[in-house]
Amino acid sequence: MTGVCGCCGALRPRYKRLVDNIFPEDPEDGLVKTNMEKLTFYALSAPEKLDRIGAYLSERLIRDVSRHRYGYVCIAMEALDQLLMACHCQSINLFVESFLKMVAKLLESEKPNLQILGTNSFVKFANIEEDTPSYHRSYDFFVSRFSEMCHSSHDDLEIRTKIRMSGIKGLQGVVRKTVNDELQANIWDPQHMDKIVPSLLFNLQHVEEAESRSPSPLQATEKEKESPTELAERCLRELLGRAAYGNIKNAITPVLIHLDNHSLWEPKIFATRCFRIIMYSIQPQHSHLVIQQLLGHLDANSKSAATVRAGIVEVLSEAAVIAASGSVGPTVLEVFNTLLRQLRLSIDYALTGSYNCITGVSSKIIKEHEERMFQEAVIKTIGSFASTLPTYQQSEVMAFIMNKVPLPSTQQSIEAGKAGENRNRLTQIMLLKSLLQVSVGFQCSNMLTALPSAFLDRLLSAALMEDAEIRLFVLEILISFIDRHDNRQKFSTISTISDISVLKLKVEKCSRQDSVFMKKHSQQLFRHIYLICKEESNIQAHYEALYSMLVLISIELANEEVVVDLIRLVLAVQEIAQINEDNLTAYNRCALFALGAAYLNLISQLITVPTFCQHIHEVIQMRQKEAPYLLPEDVFVEKPRLSKSLDRLGPEVFFWQSKISEVLGGSGYNADRLSTPYVPQLTDEDRLSKRKSIGETISLQVEVESRNSPEREQRAPAEEITYETLKKAIDSVAVEEQERERRRQVVEKFQKAPFEEIAAHCGARATLLQSKLNQIFEITIRPPPSPSGTITAAYGQPQNHSIPVYEMKFPDLCVY
């Protein structure tokens, strides 16, 4: 009976007759619109027939494809599209299955036109919002096929472009259809992302090198809008913009793999462009996830070529700048820890000449150059990261970096041998460079917060090292902290300028917090400035940094007492060059004289005491006539003009401490303090740091004569340094060695001795401690009366006489 019905047209089901009627006799006439309207009305009136209509259309389309009747294929797809747009009933799911089956059939065809036709229909379907969910629909085939189309290598350029654009549009349709529907297939699964993302990057990558990209879509040409590159970028932005917190990793991992597989880190241009798109497309609160993935990828490539690592780090730097409002995430120090670890690895690679497990690398010279480039990239990235952080986190980062610097004045291990010294020196320089990068962008009005004691102590201890480059970095770091009003560039060159008003310096009154800071740390700062001035390896950059340091302290942090101490310090520096006990070169001595002249010229105009200005001006004029080599204009030039007769200078070319104390004392300054020569108080830090002689290593504190005054005939006799004095100083070192050995034995005993022996020893000590404490408490609570019973205080009040707690003798275990 079924066969009979199939042969007789009048007996065919109505939906089949309606479907057949939409096809004209000549396919070039196109869809019969009146019959299409009848079919649409029938589908809306009888929605239960919609799935059968779809199945029959699918059957006809498959038959027409196999018979190469492509005109009827286009008509069938047009009819399907119109039915999809018109019908939104609950039976739409079954109809969609037939529709997707037909689209898949077209995409499987080798004809580009059919592939494009199927893609366009799928895109229209993707834009339809369905009323009912689908629990069993799969898009795996479409993801694979569209990704394959994105990589089309058709011989005809125009056809290849159309196929690639259709593939990108298809992927965009899949994303739109599935990304917001939890009941659909999870498009964020790695199996899908590993196909979608590389396909988009492939088209993003294949752009002509000479093509200039417009800054905004409004300015782009029509041709560029329709290019696969622009379409792929829009699709990638849309994909990343829809990514939730848990999907960021699956979206970014294929990007990293693609850049690795195609060696795209080394030119850096494409990798940087990709991550700019990523950082601007994702939600701002997810930025730190991208940063963390880049850091993890850097660790995974720690033994790759330096150029690859440098590319990753530079991309990291760009991403950090874009990250909104410092969104580096909760583990800020982990970010810097990773970068510093990579910095140290790079130093090891440069010194050893190998990546341990990698052989056959390029020559050591080339590798050292590449590693140096990588190290500079890491330092730049550290600065970029830090600039996005709030002030309190920048302080933590700087303290973290400073604690990583290996210093001889700490308990930190310092490697021995020539290789160890090179490694330590390179590590110190790179870490201080990183610290300088962070401090340049650091803005803090409170110096107590900016330079806490522990941080300042470690930083200044590095200033006492022999390496001139390290000392210069320390000075630059301190200057970047102190210069809060950008005055540094206004006096970058040392000169005796006659009118400082042309510099337009920003001078503000010293705040209370700054006064407290200077009261606490001024002598420490001045002592290190004094010791740096005595270094023979100083060059012009060091003296310029010292000059900037002195001037900035005078402008930013100085009150009346600090100004007095600065003048005493500069006069002491003049005395270093005058007496020359350290056997400095002629250039060093002339540079110190010029440094003192430049600073005193500027400070005299800042404090505006006429008699002080007059004295400074007279000495400078005398130097211009008789000793121009003592002024910065002759010393700090490309070819300095020096003199070897510095020991035969007359008193008229020196700044006299007695004269300065007299003129400033008459203006209200502390004349007694001004007339007291500056003598730095040397500490154990000098003994622990790498000094050049035993006399500097073991500081002998003696009473010395006035070192800042040029009146040498008035000197008091210095204390004689005898054999006994030196013997006592050397013995102090032996005592410390014995103390260190005793501590080592105690630690070893507690590590290796049996538990019973340790318990018995501690029990005896505890009993002794308890008895001593009981005695102390009895004395404290009931103090013994004095022989006279009581002592009458000044105001007639009786006062019990007892032993003060600070005078009591405590057992060793009570003292920490």
Image (cartoon, helix red, strand yellow):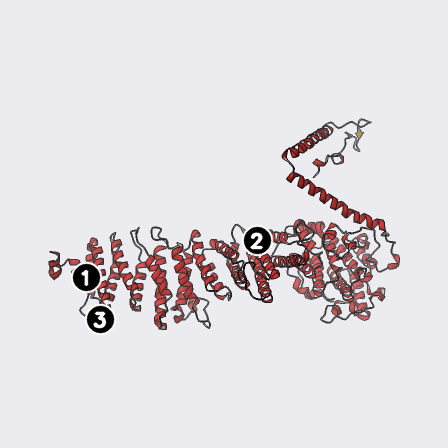
Q: Nearer the viewer, residue 526 or 489?
A: 526
Residue 716 rendering spot, x and y as whole percentages: 87, 54
Which kind of residue does numbered mark 1 sit on?
Val
- Tag 3 residue: 28
Q: Which of the two discs, 3 and 2, labels the residue nearer the N terminus?
A: 3
Question: In which quadrant is the N terminus drawn?
Answer: bottom left
Q: CB atoms at circles 1 and 2 under 8 Å apart?
A: no
Q: Which of the two discs, 1 and 2, labels the residue nearer the N terminus?
A: 1
Question: In which quadrant is the C terminus drawn?
Answer: top right
Mark 2: few/some/many CA within 10 Å (<14, 14-19, 20+): some
- Tag 2 residue: 337
Q: What residue is rendered at 58% in x and 55% in y?
A: 341
Residue 691 rendering spot, x and y as whole percentages: 74, 56
Callout 3: helix, strand or loop?
helix
- Tag 1 residue: 19
Q: Report if residue 639 is visible in the image.
A: yes
Q: CB atoms at circles 3 and 1 under 8 Å apart?
A: no
Please state which of the two labelled residues, at mark 1 or mark 2, is closer to the viewer: 2
